[in-house]
Amino acid sequence: MHPGTVDASAGLLVQFLGWVAGQPRTYAETMEAWRTSCPRISVWEDALIEGLVMTENVFSGPQGEVKVVLTKSGMDRLGQPPPRPMPLVTSRQRTSC
């Protein structure tokens, strides 16, 4: 890499962390938006391996859901304080633009 060049994967990782921090995210929503079969773009896997995100079971509702949240390391990497608790938005509650 040349001096002054930004590592694209590092930038994508920060974008992913910002996306997770932006609002409550379900595991299904995260996989739909960020899963890839390309071994060169492994943002989800990298974030898990580095301990930047984790999954939590949410038992509110008939089936419960798994949500994806930033860890303290993830918040530190993003440079954000811990988020305030917010209600989980399901796909049925979302509106289209």
Image (cartoon, helix red, strand yellow):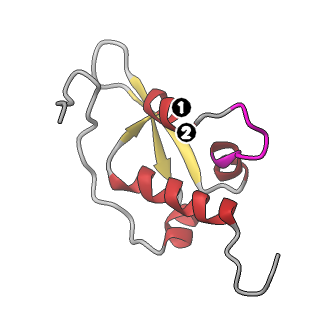
Left or right of 43? Residue 18 is left
Location of the N terminus by quadrant is bottom right
* Residue sitting at x 39%, y 40%: 25
Q: Extreme right residue here?
A: 1
In the rendering, at what x and y percent does residue 62 appear?
30, 12
In the rendering, at what x and y percent does residue 88 appear?
28, 37
Location of the C terminus by quadrant is top left
Tell me whether circle 2 and circle 1 mark residues in contact (CB < 8 Å): yes
Q: Which residue is mark 2?
A: 34
* Residue sitting at x 67%, y 75%: 6
Q: CA distance from mark 2 to mark 1?
A: 5 Å
Magenta stretch holds residue 40: yes
Q: Which residue is mark 1?
A: 31
Q: Which residues are magenta?
A: 37-43
Left or right of 92? Residue 10 is right
- Dot 2 lies on which element? helix
Front residue of 2/80: it is 2
Left or right of 72? Residue 18 is left
